[in-house]
Amino acid sequence: MVADGVGLPAPPLTAQISVTGMITATDPAICTWTNRNASDLTKAAAWVLDADYKVVVTFQGITSQPVFVGIGSAAGQSKDGSCGP
């Protein structure tokens, strides 16, 4: 998985998953959302998720369908500096 050309570190870096399924962002912070129109402020933001973590859960022999989780714990390209839409 790659965010802005850089591979996402494996958990527990950037995200931790507890035994109850709670996903928490951790250091090092990362933003996996990119505004494709960031270089032209006259255009509306065009947000894309450019990296994610694939989460699959197995409990008592039953395996879930995959869920893909983006991380928004670092500053991003929003006008206010936040990550993502």
Image (spheres, helix red, strand yellow):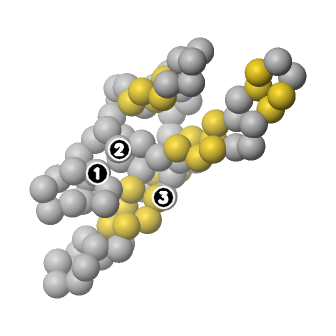
Decide which of tag 2 and tag 3 comes sooner along the chain.
Answer: 3
Residue at image coords 13%, 56%: 80
Asked whether the beta carbons under mark 1 and mark 2 sit within 8 Å of each other, the answer is: yes
Please tell me the numbered disc located at residue 83: 1
Crowding at mark 2 (Cα within 10 Å: few <14, some 14-19, many 20+): some
What is the distance, in whole Å, between disc 2 and disc 3 at their CAs?
12 Å
Q: Which residue in the protein does label 2 denote?
A: 72
- Could you tell me the amino acid type at mark 1? Cys
Q: Quadrant of the C terminus?
A: bottom left
Residue at image coords 23%, 75%: 39
Looking at the image, the residue that sits furthest to the bottom is 42
Decide which of tag 1 and tag 3 comes sooner along the chain.
Answer: 3
Q: Residue 6, can we see it? A: no
Horizontal side of residue 32 vs 73, given as left or right: right
Q: Which residue in the protein does label 3 denote?
A: 50
- Rendered image quadrant of residue 67: top right
What is the distance, in whole Å, between disc 1 and disc 3 at their CAs?
12 Å
- Could you tell me the amino acid type at mark 3? Asp
Can you give x and y, in whole percent of width and height, for residue 71 in the image?
A: 42, 42
- Could you tell me the amino acid type at mark 2? Gly
Near-viewer residue (25 or 65): 65
Instruction: Say above or below: 45 vs 81.
Output: below
Can you give x and y, in whole percent of width and height, for residue 34 in the image?
A: 37, 61
Can you give x and y, in whole percent of width and height, for residue 24 in the image?
A: 42, 27
Can you give x and y, in whole percent of width and height, for residue 37 in the image?
A: 29, 76
Q: Residue 82, can we see it? A: yes
